[in-house]
Structures are given as structure tokens and as C-alpha cells.
Image (cartoon, grey):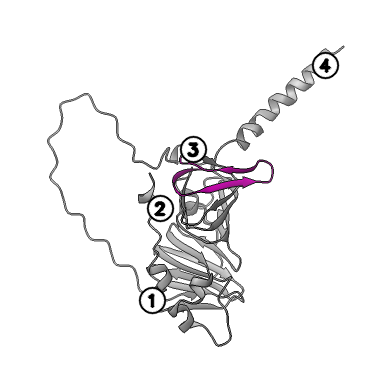
Amino acid sequence: MKFPQRLGQAILLVLAVPFIANAAVPAAKVTLITGRGTASASASGIRALAKSDPVYSGEIVHSSANSYIDLFFTDGGYFLLRPNSRFQVVDFADHSGAATPAAPKPVVPAAVPAAPAPAAAASTPAPAAPPAAGIASVTPPLLATQQDTQNGASHAFFSLLKGGFRSISGLIGKINHDEYQVTTPVATIGVRGTDYLVVICDASCATDPEIVAALPPGTNPIGGIVATVYAHSIVVDDAGGSVTLLEGQYLLVLPDGTNILLPIEPHFLHVDPTPNPATCAG
């Protein structure tokens, strides 16, 4: 009889459906692209990217010359890739459910069927407290807490292969600190709910006057990274130790793991700033 065989095939198909569906769930979508960009994976080849295209876990996103690509992730995080960058979504899984914003645009509340309320007088918000002064310091490894793990298996692992990015971490980076990580050729970066930038040092970086002035004799920064923080902090782990980088600080990590705090913003970043990815998204 062929009935048992067909039944077995049907059961296997039903069991496979969740895995097929999960594999097709986008990790992010392109909210802005200026110029050209591609996404590639070993199983699916290379495809050109356009605005609103999905990007999947495992794919490598490449931005061409003079091209920016802004990625909005399902947990509410952003990565804005600088020109000539290669960035891999190594392993991304978002199980945060309703906590995830559906789109980068603000949600407009539904109208209430009642007489319109008089316009509220504008109020001046209290000024934000100034960031605490401090310097980069060696810190112990990040430890998970009960709050860190409340989202279960949600995780976000990325890799910067070339170029640079500015990122605003989403829900995973804000809650599951140990489940968020960005690797670079010389360091691994963790966050605590932040807005930060990382650039792999190339020729324009290596000849920057601020970089050159900070270099120990006989060292070459090419292949290292420059990082800065616009809000909160990041933790940079490399061969030289674990460094906490605070808001407004600039860190140069050399290829051998030497960590150097720069006194001011490098010139190459000042003349070619990377916009806020949350506000430049279309």
C-alpha cells in the first residue's frame, strides 16, 4: 500500500513548514540606499538591493563607492553602512513579538470618536543630564541578568568585514546584552543600548593627522578600527584587553590590539560624517 508512504511524506512536509517559514523571515529591510548595493549568501548568490528590499540572516551586504545603505532590523535597530563597506548579518533571530516596531516611521494613534480636545500648550522639556565624565577603562566581561535573558532565544550577531557603519541598537542590544555582538578584524564590540560608529582604518584613516600623531613609532593603523560613541557606551574586547568607550570618546585599536584614546575626532570622520541612521531613513 502507498497510503503509509504518502502519509509519512505529508507529515514530514508539515513538520518542515515552520523551518521553511522561519528561514524566509527577513532580519531587516533597506530603508535608504544611495547609489548601489548588493546582498549575497552562499545558497542564493548575489542580488542587487533597492529601497524596501529585505535582508536575511546570514547575508553579506555590500555598499558600493559613494553609496550608503540603511538597514532597519525587526527589533528596532539600525545599521547605516558607509560607502565601500561589507557587513554580514551573521546570525539574527528576533522573538520579541509585539515589542518590535513594524516600521521605522512613527505609529499614528487611532482617532478617538469624541470631540477634539483643545490643543495643549507647548512645554519646554527639562534639559537632559550631561553625560558623566570619564575615560576608557578596563572592565570585566558583561554578565547576563534576569532582564538580559527575558527575550529567550533572541540574538543579534554581526560582522564588519570592510568599511564602516553607524548603528543604533534595537531591543536585543538594549535588553539581551550578551546576545548582541559585532566582530571586526581586530576587536569584538558589545553594547548597552547605544548609538555608535565603527570604521576599519584604511588609507584615509592612516594618513589622518590625529591618527598619525597618536601612533607609537613604527606602527601602522591600516586594518585596525576607529570607534566612537554618540550615546551611552560600548565595550571593545581585543588582544589588548576590554575597554569601555563612553559618549564623545574616540578609540583607535591597532592591528596588534593596542588601544589608544584619541584626544579629538579624527579629521577623516569630521569631513565625512555618518548621519544618524534613525533620522536619515526614508
**Callout 2 environment at 10 Å: few (<14), some (14 to 19), or many (20+)?**
many
**Callout 4 environment at 10 Å: few (<14), some (14 to 19), or many (20+)?**
few
Asked if marks 2 and 1 touch (Cβ < 8 Å), the reply is no
Which label belongs to residue 224? Answer: none
**Callout 3 environment at 10 Å: few (<14), some (14 to 19), or many (20+)?**
few
Q: Earlier in the sequence, mark 2 or mark 3?
A: 3
Question: Rounded to the nearest whole Å, what is the CA distance between mark 4 and mark 3?
Answer: 38 Å
Residue type at tag 2: Pro
Which label belongs to residue 97? Answer: 3
Which label belongs to residue 4? Answer: 4
Question: Rounded to the nearest whole Å, what is the CA distance between mark 2 and mark 4?
Answer: 55 Å
- As helix, strand or loop, the secondary structure at mark 2 comes to helix
Point out residue 242 in the picture as x, y percentages from the top left corner. Answer: 55, 71
Q: Nearer the viewer, mark 2 or mark 3?
A: 2
- As helix, strand or loop, the secondary structure at mark 1 comes to loop
Residue at numbered disc 1 = 264
- As helix, strand or loop, the secondary structure at mark 4 comes to helix
Which residue: 52% across, 58% down? 84
Question: Rounded to the nearest whole Å, what is the CA distance between mark 4 and mark 1?
Answer: 72 Å
Q: In terms of depth relative to the viewer, which is nearer, 233 or 140?
A: 233
Residue type at tag 3: Gly
Question: Rounded to the nearest whole Å, what is the CA distance between mark 2 and mark 1?
Answer: 23 Å
Residue 223 appears in view: yes
Which residue: 64% across, 31% down? 18
The residue segment tinted magenta is 29-51
Q: Is residue 263 above or below residue 197?
A: below
